[in-house]
Amino acid sequence: MTLKIYRTCFFLPLLTAAFLTGCASFPDRISPGAHLLDPNQLRAGSALASAAKQPAPWPSQQWWKAYADPQLDSLVAEATAGNPTIRIAQARLEKARALSGISRSLLLPSAGGSAGFMRERYTENQFIPPPYAGSWSWDNLATVGLSYNLDLWGKNRSALAAALDTVQVASAEAQEVQLAMQTAVVRSYVQLSLQFVLKDIAQTTLRQRQDILDITRKRLAAGLAAELDLRQAETPIPAALAEVERVSESIELLRNQLSELTGKGPGDGEGIRRPTLSFNLPVRLPAVLPADLLGRRPDVVAQRWRVEAAAQGIEAAKGDFYPNVNISAFAGWQSLGFSKFLSPSSLIEGFGPAVSLPIFEGGRLRSRLGVSTADYDIAVESYNSTLIQALRNVADQVVILRSLETQHAESATSNRLAFQAYDLALRAFRAGLTDYLGVLNAQTQTLVEAQRKAGVEARFLDAYAVLMQEIGGGVPVVAPPAGTGGRK
């Protein structure tokens, strides 16, 4: 008879929960409205199609080695290992993992113990029997308890899945930070290379103007030039000296910037030598670009994992509408006084289920479901926006690189012709066949064309680094399994 009572008391709450589950209902009008874009349905455009005609493998994790500069390799390695921003991203990843552990604990039994020893005077006007009534004594209690949430409706499992998806978000974001840092080092290094070239051009221009000044002085001494010609030849010299100093300043500032990126002080940047970058950088792309970006670009992958986490958040919010069933048990000792505290007669124990069901929450559950649904729509549209922008950025860089290849050839021709014209003008000036203005114009044109050529070359090197970043840079990322659509 006693066993039947125990069974009835144990299973009655479960039967009640099952009955009440049939009464649970969700607001019909609260459902996601956003839909994930299919990357395969996005038109890649002619720029990407032409670049993928000769399919290239995805870049390696050390894509910057294509520049063939050992010093650059060393700087990127130092930045990856020592920059505080990367360590912050890693700490955020560890935080996300720790938070997922909290969610995981909700699926496991929990145990705890408590003990209390209270000395008190007991009333004489209640159920306390003599000799304790009206006297002082110790009220002692020590128990060990065990509880387990059955999670019949999957609320805690959905919360754990959302937390694990958030870990993947943090992991992709950490990889995005790493890729951005690597790209920043390469781009700063390219600018440093440009400044060294511009310094060469400035020093060459200074020497040319000094040569013109020397010729003018000789012509003045020979009576072939006037004092005005001498003053005109002297005027550009200070500006040329100032340009050399300005470029030298830029070089030092870029060295400081690279030191910061590597997580070091400015003094370490003083040892950075002149870059020796290779221009043999093929502009080719993998064949199936739109779809493969989903598994390659850290920011796209992070947004996709956010969609998965938001979908699980909806399932967890739905679980609030169902009964919550817990199984608990306890055992311990309780007694008045210490003489029989640990004796078998002081043993206490108990077990049983507990059921709780929200009946009236003032719209709290409905609002929470609405928030989770809106979060899902935001995550989906953020993913769609990131994917579209990613394709656009890749296409932009391909267009830029193709254009720069053409510009480089044209600027090289213009630079060669400008120096040929300057040589002819200088010879004529020495022979007294032309005046100072003619040679100055020719010399100024060499400066313009040399700077233009250097700028085009630097833009090409920079655009290649940006392209590697836009297609993911070879950083390994974990994308959601194929076929998942956010909503389970």
Image (spheres, grey):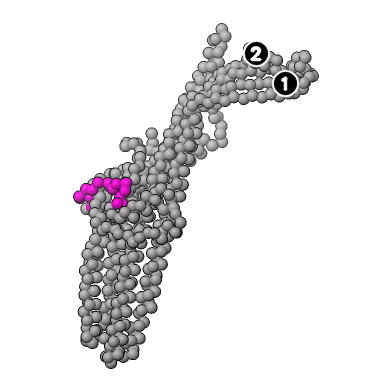
Residue in the picture at 31% in, 82% down: 213
Residue in the picture at 40% in, 57% down: 258
Residue in the picture at 26% in, 61% down: 404
Front residue (pair 133, 202): 202
How far across and down, in percent of the image, does residue 413 sit? 21, 69
Q: Magenta residues?
A: 51-65
> Does residue 297 appear left or right of residue 92 in this picture?
left
> Does residue 310 appear left or right of residue 393 in this picture?
right
Measured along the vertical axis of the image, is residue 477 above or below residue 237?
A: above
User: What amino acid does circle 1 point to?
Assistant: Trp
Q: Main secondary structure of the magenta part?
A: loop
SS at badge 2:
loop
Measured along the vertical axis of the image, is residue 279 above or below residue 353?
A: below
Front residue (pair 57, 443): 443
User: Residue at the left extreme?
Assistant: 54
Disc with the residue nearer the chain's start (1 vs 2): 1
How far across and down, in percent of the image, does residue 131 sit? 77, 14
Residue in the picture at 58% in, 22% down: 144
| Residue 61 belongs to magenta span | yes
How far across and down, in percent of the image, does residue 293 sit? 31, 46
Please give the residue where the numbered disc 1 appears in the rendered image.
138
How far across and down, in percent of the image, does residue 93 sit? 44, 41
Mark 1 to mark 2 CA distance (whole Å): 16 Å
Residue 343 numbered mark, or none = 2
Query: From this viewpoint, is residue 36 visible?
Result: no
Quarter placement of the C terminus: top left
SS at badge 1:
strand
